[in-house]
Amino acid sequence: MAEPETQLLLAVGLIEKDTNGDALWVWCYPSITAELRSLLLRKCCLTDENKLLHTFVFGQYKRLWFYITTVEVQDSPALKKVTHFSIVLTAKDFNPEKYAAFTRILCRIYLKHGSPVKMMESYIAVLTKGICQSEENGSFLSKDFDARKAYLAGSIKDIVSQFGMETVILYTALMLKKRIVVYHPRIEAIQEFTRTLPALVWHRQDWSIVHSYVHLNEEEVEALKACTGYIAGFIDSEVNSRPDLYDVYVNLADSEITISPVVKEAMTMGKLHKEIGQLIVQSAEDPDKSDSQVIKDISLKTKEILATLASLTEASDGHEKRTLNSEALKQKRFPPATENFLFHLAAAEQMLKI
């Protein structure tokens, strides 16, 4: 049973850019903290010097998701002094398609009425009933957008066609809960790539590791560092010179993946990795397979690896959680890179005896 919308939506807000070129917070409901307001001003493209309009961006900050739709105002009698505005939604769940659809409706309402009151009515309708309907602005039904659909919305095949066998580096980093930083000058490219990566470790169904739009700002960097493993997207090439932030660095613009010296040992590639890499490439290159079938193929391989790991664990005194029996692992005489990977995987899954 999915949580009702009342549990997921947190707040709605409005940022306007006026004819003087100032971008300001105009309204929010029920409330957005000052810290979050300054973060969202930074994320919405209205404060950008480069004047590029990004119609929709999303990201996460301290376990809270934000979704921002921005429009240019053209001949709207209701908004004479406004050139652009952004509608912001904050929520507990990852679902870009759902919130893009809802913010688009809110934008139409605001363009027409020029007053937040009408927007608030729709927001409350979705909050309480999960639906808002109107003839002219379109209707929105939140149950049309389930989480699984959002998890499957990206294209793994695109990632594999760009990185080929190197995709296994991303797979390994995700399995071992490492820190992945992704750079590309275009925010849209970053968002598409970062949101798709967790599907490589489908068994976890954990999209909370995605931070698809991070600035090199002190608070944001500190919040990121507080997370164990993550996928963080940056449009600032400066991030390249911040080795403290990543174990694996993906330059998406140049299709290059770099492994940090810090994790070289844990990420040693061997026969098993080659097998996984070949399976990923073979599956993704099959024109008859959909993205979700590719995800399934990878997931089956992952299940095999996890079953092998489970067979090497033992019940520990009075604890529910089983731990790795290092002797059993050594006796298997796996190739060194496989043994190494299984050991680090056990560590990532918190299966090591403390």
Image: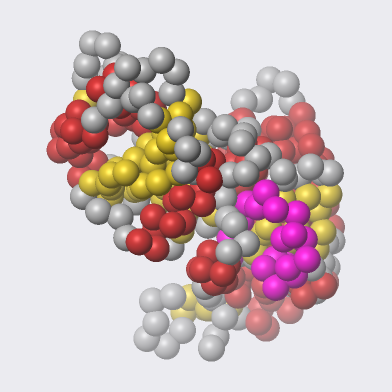
Q: Is residue 353 above or below residue 182?
A: below
Q: Position of residue 163 (x, y in %)?
A: 80, 42
Q: Residue at x 32, y 44 (%)?
A: 26
Q: Is residue 281 visible?
A: no
Q: Residue at x 39, y 63 (%)?
A: 35
Closer to us: 317 or 90: 90
Which residue occupies the extreme top position in the image? 135
Report which quarter residue 148 is drawn in.
Answer: top left
Q: Residue at x 52, y 30 (%)?
A: 55
Q: Position of residue 303 (x, y in %)?
A: 58, 52
Q: Is residue 39 left or right of residue 118?
A: right
Q: Position of residue 343 (x, y in %)?
A: 68, 74
Q: Is residue 249 visible?
A: yes
Report which quarter residue 243 is drawn in.
Answer: bottom right
Q: Is residue 70 above or below residue 13?
A: above
Numbered-mark total:
0
Q: Is residue 84 above or below residue 228?
A: above
Q: Is residue 240 left or right of residue 194?
A: right
Q: Residue at x 34, y 40 (%)?
A: 14
Closer to us: 196 or 345: 196
Closer to us: 182 or 288: 182
**Residue range of the region highlighted in magenta in the rendering:** 228-247
Report which quarter residue 180 is drawn in.
Answer: bottom right
Is residue 237 on the magenta stretch?
Answer: yes
